[in-house]
Amino acid sequence: MKKTYYNRVDETLYEFKLDNGLDLFIIPKHGFQKSYVTMTAKYGSIHNDFYIDDILMHMPKGIAHFLEHKMFEKEDGDMFNAFSKYGSSANAFTSYDRTSYLFTTVESLKENIKLLMDMLNTPYFTEESVQKEVGIIAEEIKMYQDQPNYKLYYQTMNAMYHTHPVKYDIAGTVDSISEITDKTLYQCYETFYHPENMVMFIVGDVDPFDLYTYVNEISYKHKEFNDVLLMEFEEPANVYQPYIQSFENVQKDKLMLGIKTQIHTYESSHMKLEMEVLFALDLLFGEQTEFYQSLLEDHLIDDSFGFNFIIEPTFSHILIAGATDQPEVLKERLLNQLHNFEVLNDQTAFDRLVKQTIGEYVSSMNSPEYIANQFTRYFFNGAILFDLLPTLESLSLSNCIQTYKATIADAAITDSRMLPNG
């Protein structure tokens, strides 16, 4: 057992290793009515190619998301109903690098934990049930593909990346999911859903030692875990397509600049790099900037304009997007601003952003959902959520500028557009 007190946010983190190898983290929140529990596998949509007994397996795109759906289905019924009988609300999600199962409850915490663990330790797949699920997820895929912003995002990702699986829809395609069978589901389950490849997180008004004892007693024993050997990604630094466009039922042109970076390869903390680039982008494109206001005044953007930066162990990129009547003019202005390094040198604006972000971070400690979900994300990337505050306080404007300049210097850009039909 390891106990760490983070005095700046007044949180105590308890870390346990169960007999079956599962990492268990508990944060007591005295006085909170609600408890929030997640159990997460280090397995996401980009993990389609891996080795079993030295044989390279190529799994259909979307199988991690498909497996997430199927874990709620058992021979004797739907697990959602089982959770609701104990007064909890259950859900799950699949991202590029993890699959997380969760529930929130104000009662029967132990009973719900047992339900969650039983569900994840007793897979039930049949040929008939898999075929039924293919139809359900196919309709889900079609529904999302009717959304212009969703289509523009994946259009951009497909143009940015040559072979990296981040370019593909997390849910897969109608064709790819039709290749999924009960056998391939069991292969993925046996490979990735092992306690030593998962983490459980509990936050609420709980006794950590009592919960640890209970969870350890009901934990399933598994055969010895072999570290998953994934096929390495070989992704060029340049973009696959510098320009791409499509025609959809939209009122205005939609422009998205996909800026493919190599910052994930840097020998530095991803948490720190993420913050430095995000602060630089906010100084350049944030709503408080003169640049943003000038785009509004010139009617080049509306309130749909936004930007983001994503960094994960095997990829990183910046996305800037908005609806506009003048895509060429907007593109030129955005590209010029990307390299407007003089604007970055504003200590007052930087200090204000840091204080604002710290305030938002501290207030988010009142959200069990935020703590649990963000903790798991950082944990799988080798960091602890509570390290974010000292990271924010240690940031300097000069380092942010330096990191941002290096990020942009080796970036490649895709111009992705969605135009009105006709």
Image: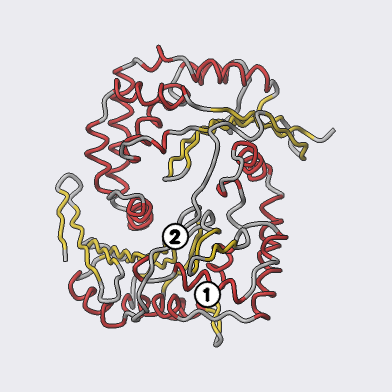
Q: Where is residue 413 in the image (x, y as percent from the top left)?
A: 58, 28
Q: Position of residue 88 (x, y in %)?
A: 42, 72
Residue 81 falls left or right of residue 278: right
Instruction: Find numbered disc 2 in the image and state the secondary structure of the residue it sits on.
Output: loop
Q: Which residue lies furthest to the right in this view?
A: 422
Check the picture and name the quadrant holding the N terminus. Answer: bottom left
For the point 58% across and 64% down, the residue is: 63
Residue 184 falls left or right of residue 385: right
Name the residue type under label 2: Leu
Q: In this view, does 88 lie above or below 396?
A: below
Residue 132 falls left or right of residue 53: right
Instruction: Find numbered disc 1 in the image and state the secondary structure of the residue it sits on.
Output: loop
Across the whole image, how many numbered discs are drawn on residues?
2
Circle 1 residue: 72
Circle 2 residue: 229
Q: In which quarter of the image is residue 57?
A: bottom right
Q: Is residue 130 above or below residue 24?
A: below
Q: In which quarter of the image is residue 201?
A: bottom left
At label 2, counting other C-alpha atoms closer than 10 Å, the crowd grade (few under 14, some 14-19, many 20 or more) is some
Q: Where is residue 53 in the image (x, y as percent from the top left)?
A: 48, 69
For the point 61% across and 76% down, the residue is: 182
